[in-house]
Amino acid sequence: MPRDNREPRARRRCFACGEPISRGTKTCPHCEEVQPSGVLSIVLATVGVFTFLIGFLVGMFSIGMSSIVGFVIAIVGLALAVGSYSRYLDIQAAKRGRPQ
């Protein structure tokens, strides 16, 4: 009977403590840290881009206090998009075993 070679690939390391865990585990059994998901980062980056665009449009085409609020929303959206995308890149680098 041939040996199953998928077992070593079915394991990964915890993002926080570095202990080996199975690939489908959502929380680490050693440190109980929730494992990050790349999908969540991409969704947050997309929401950030749309928030930036809406805030920019509100800021450009309104006057008074609403324009200030629009530009603040645009800044929050930009920060959300850039932060989420950089988190996604950090997760991908950790999965490949590269230093951050």
Image: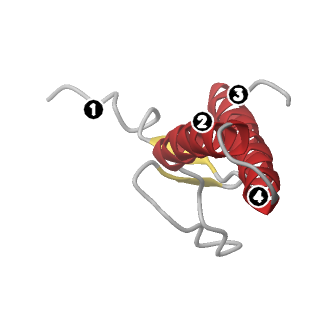
Viewer-nearest residue: 100 or 2: 100
Q: Would you place residue 75 above or below residue 68 in this image? A: above
Q: Which residue position is annotated with label 3?
A: 93
The residues bearing labels 1 and 3 have C-alpha atoms spaced at a distance of 27 Å
Find out whether the residues at labels 4 and 2 contact each other: C-beta distance under 8 Å. no
Viewer-nearest residue: 22 or 82: 82
Residue at position x 54%, y 68% from top?
A: 27
Relative to residue 57, is residue 46 drawn left or right?
left
Of label 4 and label 3, which has the lower sequence position? Answer: 4
Residue 46's spot in the image, x, y percent? Answer: 52, 38
Residue 86's spot in the image, x, y percent? Answer: 74, 34
Relative to residue 31, is residue 12 drawn left or right?
left
Front tag of 1 and 2: 2
Q: Which residue position is annotated with label 1?
A: 4
Front tag of 1 and 3: 3
Q: Residues within 10 Å of mark 4 (few under 14, many from 20)?
A: some
Question: Amino acid type of disc 1?
Answer: Asp
Q: Would you place residue 99 above or below residue 70 in this image? A: above
Callout 3: helix, strand or loop? helix
Residue at position x 71%, y 36% from top?
A: 60
Front tag of 4 and 2: 4
Callout 1: helix, strand or loop? loop
Front tag of 4 and 1: 4
Callout 2: helix, strand or loop? helix
Question: Amino acid type of disc 4?
Answer: Val
The residues bearing labels 3 and 2 have C-alpha atoms spaced at a distance of 29 Å
Front tag of 3 and 2: 2
Find out whether the residues at labels 4 and 1 contact each other: C-beta distance under 8 Å. no
Of label 1 and label 2, which has the lower sequence position? Answer: 1
Residue at position x 80%, y 53% from top?
A: 72
Q: Which residue position is annotated with label 4?
A: 69
